[in-house]
Amino acid sequence: LDRYSSPLIDVNGKDQGRAWFFRDITDQKRLAKEKQEMLMRVKDEKLLSDSLVNTTVDGILVVNPEGKAILFNENFVQMFNIPKEILATKDGSKFAGYSLKNLKAPNKFLKEIKELNLHKDRKSRDEVEFKDGKVLDRYSSPLIDVNGKDQGRAWFFRDITDRIRALHAKSEFLANMSHELRTPLNSVIGFSEVLNAETFGPLNEKQKSYMNYVLRSGKHLLLLINDILSLVKVEEGKMELFFSVFPVKKALETSLILLKELLAEKKIESSLEVPEDIGNIEADKRRLKEIIDNLLSNAVKFTPVGGKIGIKAWRRSEEIEFEIWDTGVGIAVENMSKIFAVFTRIEPSFSKATEGTGLGLSYAKKLVELHGGRIWIKSDGLGKGTAVSFTLPIKQKKRK
């Protein structure tokens, strides 16, 4: 931990104690150490070729500032299947040129390399897809010595083909299962509604109670299936956003109005704090409504009778920050790290009394990120309420 301490002195010069600030710099230190080790190895090609680089599962390529390959291991050669005569040139540009014919998106690959050549200090991470279905996770980092001098660039490649295929298989299974369940479930819900309405004759109190339970459970299961299908679409990159420009305040007012009856039923007070001049946003209106509705639904669900919920929004430079807060059950510190996990429902003692799929926050997070925004949660602990905040760009960047 990086530790910083400062005395607290009031305006009269009186001692008010001391403030301590701690920052976790574990990753920063580890990366600095790894970079320094790499720089030391770059000075000795023989040491490089005989040590770590040939024991890792990653493919490694290190080039000097002129683009000459000063290191590559056997895994790199096998991943890109580069012929010996091209390897012998130790020319990084020839390595890349040969690889292009095997890639699914060669222009994207070439463009990224050109961008990194122009911006020597930039790090990069993406995926490289081959025509034969192989997928590599690619990470690139500049090599800068202790004096800030450019020493070249390191490339690391890891084969993630099996992981990607497993994810696709999981998504396909969930999508197929959900579609297969929908048809019989719609029949269960439809006939339950007919019976519940006593269309074919009266029901006694016990029968009505059972029918309400069947109907409620059926609708809950249909909601879960629909959420799964939406989540699969986002994860597979198949959800298309349709951007338009619309007023922020009006969109938030609409979502709050739709909760009017539920709020009245639980005697929950609501508030909307949005400046009149907040203006418009360029976003997918339907998806933004889903984000807000999901977060508001959670706020109402986990706020006891007589509590309060609210929406805030304000402009911050080139983005708008939204906050949905409540005075509900709050979140324990130990649960904060898993709050966005799929199918996670926290605070079991309370959530047993509430309905939910455990997908709402995960789905909202993915929609926010799909817009190019960020999302986070604050809570001071159990019984102290929750605030979910997220940002969205005011204007969307050009997408290719």
Image (cartoon, rainbow, N blue to C red):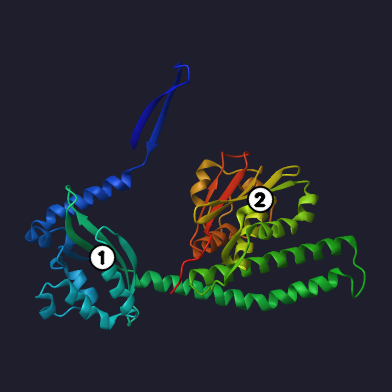
Q: Specify the quadrant that holds the N terminus.
A: top left
Q: Would you say residue 350 is visible in this rendering?
A: yes
Q: Residues within 10 Å of mark 1 (few under 14, many from 20)?
A: few
Left or right side of 115 for 175: right
Give residue 153's position: percent from left, percent from top.
Answer: 20, 61
Q: Identity of the amino acid at label 1?
A: Leu
Q: Nearer the viewer, residue 295 or 48?
A: 295
Q: Provide the residue designation for mark 2.
A: 299
The residue positioned 62% from the left and 78% from the top of the image is 180
Q: Which residue is mark 1?
A: 118
Drawn side of residue 343 relative to residue 198, left or right: left
> Which quadrant of the figure has residue 72?
bottom left
Query: In the rendered structure, which disc, 2 or 1, sits on the residue that comes first in sequence?
Result: 1
Q: Residue at x 9, y 75 (%)?
A: 88
| Callout 1 secondary element | helix
Report the quarter where the C terminus lies. bottom left
Considering every residue shown, the one lying at the far front of the view is 277
Label for residue 24?
none
Q: SS at mark 2?
A: helix
How far is the residue under mark 2 from the one under mark 1? 47 Å
What is the count of numbered marks? 2
Frontmost of labels 2 and 1 is: 1
Q: Position of residue 161 (x, y in %)?
A: 35, 73
Tell which of 245 and 153 is nearer to you: 245
Q: Residue at x 51, y 47 (%)?
A: 336
- Taking the spot 75% from the left edge, 44% from the top edge, the residue there is 305
Q: Which amino acid, by three-letter code, is at mark 2?
A: Ala
Question: Which one is in front, 68 or 381?
Answer: 68
Label 2 close to label 1 by CB (< 8 Å): no
User: Considering only vertical position in the picture, is 44 above or below 224?
Assistant: above
